[in-house]
Image (cartoon, helix red, strand yellow):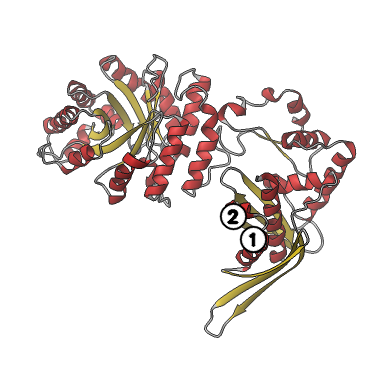
């Protein structure tokens, strides 16, 4: 494990695999969890919380498989659990036994740090609340574990009974805990409170333990609260990738890490690893099938996107005048959004971004095509891949991968009410005529399968292309013909994501156009 034990280091503790998976609508298999752990290690976080062994069979399996299937270069795997039960014994406590059996060098245990919760939720005395922490930490350190204590409800507890909350911290330190992780469990605190309370803790604790911060985003302040804690002396930040977590989520590591490194000068990741942030954020979003908010700071697809307008030519001259950091530092990039409003400066910059040699007449051609197509209902801002193909065509380029002879879709309803859909495509791939028929659960699925089957022999790499989203919108076209359908298709090959667009009064035609361009774009960029 990489040692970063300097005064300016803020440890990153990722809790995506436990807290992050509490988010509504997300579920991860053990395989998914192993893949996410690999990504976190690649990013270079200090600690990866793998889950709560004993809470469910999946987490037990995760820790069992992690031993043989997970090779971590920078991160330490941590098992999560809790203190012993009230009036129980550490020797026969199932939770503590599961923690030991997970065989991680570090463990994190949750402890009640609020007098109110000890008395009301645990229905026990404050003395017993403290004894539960003392006994459990001693037991785990005696078993050679590095012990971090997750101080549940710390901020709310401190506000009503600071003496007890401090007593809990002392008990953890005296028993050998290395980290006191202060939790804003209900997520209701604000930065000024966190700053004041962490400062008081730091004053009391000094250097006897590392102070950590664990925030939930219920006030929209999880990142701000974490920064406030660091300002007051916390040197360990817990959070999740893309801010995943129950309710409104946890501290978003993809925001707090660059803030700490780029704005405040702390070291969170090994040298040179911050540039991996956008890729890891995207990869994990993909594994969990949970798209990133396009407007997410630093890693969102719109984070450094500039729309055509007055600023465009100024941005061309001095990009840094309009961007708060260099997007490359977090592995993102500047994007110029192109629409019918685009002037020559925008098109020229977009061409440079895409590495296309486009000059005078071709620029005018692109502007003319954009105006015409956007009038018909296209929206190229949302479909970078289609825009690139349009710009290439303006230079005289034509795709040579395949030529479509015809396409037909039939949908039948049988007597028993079942719908079946079948598509036939006839395409030329070089001198070969390929005719394929496929069934699908709907017309788009059927034409996608038939087209891929027809192209698959010559272009096996297409098997890596997956359609990730299909959006249909009925729009009122500016033209007199009335409503048309706009189809957007998102696709990925695992490394690159792209979006294509099709517009037509006929939904099948609109889908077909978007689909065909999606595969052409994939072929163009895949080796
Ligand atoms: Zn939490």
Disc 1, disc 2: CB below 8 Å? yes
Q: Position of residue 483 (x, y in %)?
A: 73, 63
Q: Nearer the viewer, residue 56 or 435?
A: 435
Q: Residue furthest right?
A: 361
Q: Residues within 10 Å of mark 1 (few under 14, many from 20)?
A: many
In whole angstroms, how far apart are the C-alphas of marks 1 and 2?
8 Å
Is residue 244 found left or right of 368 in the rendered image?
left
Q: Is residue 259 visible?
A: yes
- Quadrant observed for ligand 1 in the rendered image: top left
Report which residue position mark 2 lands on: 463
Please provide percent x and percent y for residue 478. Answer: 79, 56
- The answer to whether the residue bearing label 1 lies less than 8 angstroms from the nearest atom of ligand 1 is no
The percent coordinates of residue 216 (x first, y second) are 39, 36
Which of the 4 quarters of the picture holds residue 176?
A: top left
Q: Is residue 280 above or below residue 291?
A: above
- The mark tally for this picture is 2
Which corner quadrant holds the C terminus?
top right
Please report whichever mark, 1 or 2, sits nearer to the chain's N-terminal start: 1
- Left or right: 85, with 334 as reference point: left
Local SS, label 2: helix
Check residue 452 in the rendering and tell me which mark sits there, or answer none: 1
**Residue sitting at 34 percent across and 39 percent down?**
50
Is ligand 1 within 8 Å of the beta carbon of the residue shown at mark 2? no
């Amino acid at each position: 494990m990489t040692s970063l034990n300097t005064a300016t280091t803020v440890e990153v503790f990722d809790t995506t695999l436990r807290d992050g998976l509490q988010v509504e609508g997300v579920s991860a298999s053990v395989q998914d969890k192993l893949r996410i752990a690999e990504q976190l290690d690649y990013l270079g976080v200090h600690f990866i919380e793998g889950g709560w062994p004993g809470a469910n069979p999946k987490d037990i399996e995760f820790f069992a498989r992690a031993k043989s299937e997970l090779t971590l270069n920078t991160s330490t795997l941590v098992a999560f659990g809790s203190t012993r039960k009230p009036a129980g014994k550490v020797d026969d406590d199932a939770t503590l036994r599961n923690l030991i059996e997970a065989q991680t060098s570090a463990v994190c245990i949750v402890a009640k740090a609020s007098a109110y919760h000890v008395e009301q939720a645990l229905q026990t005395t404050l003395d017993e609340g403290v004894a539960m922490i003392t006994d459990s930490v001693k037991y785990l350190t005696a078993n050679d574990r590095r012990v971090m204590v997750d101080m549940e409800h710390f901020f709310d507890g401190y506000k009503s009974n600071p003496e007890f909350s401090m007593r809990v911290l002392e008990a953890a330190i005296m028993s050998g805990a290395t980290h006191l992780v202060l939790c804003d469990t209900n997520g209701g605190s604000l930065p000024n409170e966190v700053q004041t309370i962490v400062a008081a803790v730091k004053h009391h604790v000094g250097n006897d333990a590392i102070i950590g911060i664990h925030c939930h985003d219920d006030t929209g302040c999880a990142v701000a609260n974490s920064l406030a804690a660091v300002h007051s002396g916390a040197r360990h930040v817990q959070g999740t990738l893309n801010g995943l977590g129950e309710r409104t989520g946890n501290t978003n590591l993809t925001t707090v890490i660059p803030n700490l490194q780029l704005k405040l000068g702390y070291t969170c990741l090994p040298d040179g690893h911050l540039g991996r942030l956008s890729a890891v954020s995207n990869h994990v979003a993909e594994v969990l099938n949970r798209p990133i908010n396009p407007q997410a700071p630093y890693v969102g697809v719109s984070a450094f996107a500039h729309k055509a307008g007055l600023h465009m030519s100024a941005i061309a001259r001095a990009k840094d005048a309009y961007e708060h950091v260099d997007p490359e530092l977090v592995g993102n990039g500047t994007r110029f959004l192109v629409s019918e409003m685009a002037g020559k400066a925008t098109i020229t910059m977009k061409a440079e971004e895409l590495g296309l040699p486009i000059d005078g007449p071709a620029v005018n051609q692109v502007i003319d095509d954009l105006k015409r197509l956007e009038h018909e209902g296209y929206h190229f801002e949302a479909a970078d891949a289609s825009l690139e193909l349009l710009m290439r065509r303006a230079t005289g380029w034509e795709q040579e991968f395949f030529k479509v002879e015809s396409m037909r879709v039939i949908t039948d309803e049988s007597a028993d009410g079942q719908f079946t859909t079948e598509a036939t495509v006839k395409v030329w791939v070089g001198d070969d005529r390929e005719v394929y028929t496929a069934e699908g659960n709907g017309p788009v699925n059927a034409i996608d399968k038939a087209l891929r089957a027809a192209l698959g022999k010559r272009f096996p790499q297409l098997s890596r292309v997956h359609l990730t989203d299909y959006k249909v919108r009925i729009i009122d076209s500016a033209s007199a013909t009335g409503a048309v359908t706009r189809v957007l298709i998102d696709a990925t090959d695992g490394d690159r994501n792209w979006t294509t667009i099709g517009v037509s009064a006929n939904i099948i035609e609109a889908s077909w156009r978007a689909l065909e361009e999606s595969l052409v774009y994939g072929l163009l960029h895949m080796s």
